Image: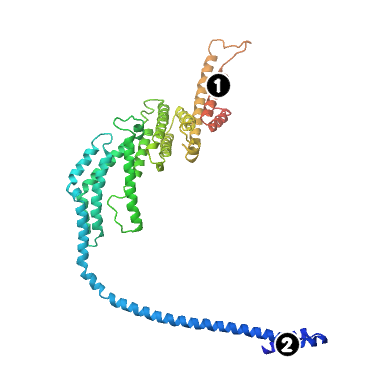
Amino acid sequence: MDVDVEEAALEQVAALLQRPDQLEKLPELKKRADRKKLAVEAMLRTGVQGQLEGIRTAIAHLQTASEDVTAISQGVADIRERLKPFPQLKEKLRELRDANARHGQYAAAMENLKHIFNLQATLQEIRDALDDDKSGGNLLLAHKHIMDLERARDELLAEVHKMNETNTEKEQNLLVNFFKGVDTVVAELSKNMWFILGRTLEMVKGNEQGGGPQQVVTCLRIVEREERIDNFYMDARSKNSSAFVPPGRPRKWKEKALRSLEKTVVNRVDGNQLEDRSLNKAWLARYLEVCRNVIMDDLQSAKIAIPCFPPDWQIYDRYVNMYHSAVCRKLREVASDRLEKSELVQLMSWIKFYASEDMLGHPKLKINAQAILQDSPVLTRSTLNSLCDQFVEMSREDLKLWLKNTVSHETLDWNKNVRPSEDNHGYFYTDLPNTVFGMLKDTCVRKKRISYGCGFHVKCMRGKRPD
């Protein structure tokens, strides 16, 4: 390394003294080199001094940390020594803890003594409120009494739930059996509510005697209360898996209310079929027309019912989807049966009419019928093609039979001892070609009205010779 330094120095000197006249500057160059050397030495001293100061500081910190660790170790040891009596203290305070738990139970019982002593009287008041009027009764009063009894029961059950003893299940069963009458009146209340909600559309129109929109709103208020209670306990359970949840929760009354509405819609669609093919040949046309009237009337009533429901229910959209689903299910069931030719025409014509301005596309309903049918068509494309094929085959068979009978009739007329018909020019004349093509034209027009695909198949059928 010293050789490298010496060689580097020689190169620097050779670079500085390349000419003889540069020797005159040698003293100046030596002074400059000395100053540079002093500056570098000063920088080195400063750096070394800074490093020494850092080492001194680090040593001081290590010393302080060692003293702190020693103090903390001593403190932890003292704490452990002081905590040794605590397990024995816990055993000594067991009786006090049990007494405190009993005190909590007694306090809850004292607060609910009124409901405990008057349980049967309160249950009777609830039944009287429910039977106050057959259209629904005083549901709010009944639900208030039920909530009071449930609050008393749940507070007592919550206190028992906090206990860690082995006989808690027995005590819980005792309380549940004591308040079992509450579950009975809850079932009666829900039965009345589903009865009222099932007739929502009639009530908003004022067609139900003794009832009206206020009864529907009352039921929905109770449902919303129950949903808030369900959410409270479910949120507590999600945060703590051992949290107390009363028996019968969650009730999910909102879900049951929607199922009640859907059941009514299905009954409205299915219940309009009062006859079948054996009673009336036009049974399908009559049923579809009744469905059209019922659906149009009910959807207009559903728009009236919008203010009765909470906005998050989106009740009008739900009604539209429920009616559409019920119609799809019913018509798919009808399409799965073996239909006659006239019934095929009626079914496919009604399906094509379903999204028109005279039904779902009516301006008053404000429904995007095309979007609904695009997401959920009434019949699948394969089913429509199958129905179309059935109609074409039936039309072909009818045409064969009709041509056979017509030709036979024309043959008999031709062989009669009567002069055939003549035109204005004296030529023999028959109406058979005009009749045949008129029949084909009527068939094509009818098929075009119900489905363009069927019209195409019928036109193809015209080019085939009948057997």
Pinpoint residue 323: horizontal percent, then vertical percent: 41, 36
Residue kind at label 2, given as amino acid type: Lys
Residue located 23% across and 35% down the image: 132
Residue located 36% across and 41% down the image: 258
Check residue 438 in the rendering and tell me which mark sits there, or answer none.
Answer: 1
Placement of 287 over or under 256, stated as above or below:
above
Asked if the residues shown at circle 2 and circle 1 are in contact, with their CB atoms under 8 angstroms apart, the answer is no
> The N terminus lies in which quarter of the figure?
bottom right
Residue kind at label 1, given as amino acid type: Gly
Query: Is 202 situated left or right of 328 in this image?
Result: left
- Extreme left residue here? 117
> The C terminus lies in which quarter of the figure?
top right
Placement of 466 over or under 251, stated as above or below:
above
Pinpoint residue 456: horizontal percent, then vertical percent: 56, 31
- Say whether residue 167 is visible: no
Which residue is more in the foreground, 380 or 436? 380
Which residue is more in the foreground, 293 or 427? 293
Which residue is more in the foreground, 78 or 356? 78
Marks 2 and 1, how far apart at CA:
129 Å
The residue identified by callout 2 is 30
Q: Secondary structure at mark 2?
A: helix
Q: Earlier in the sequence, mark 2 or mark 1?
A: 2
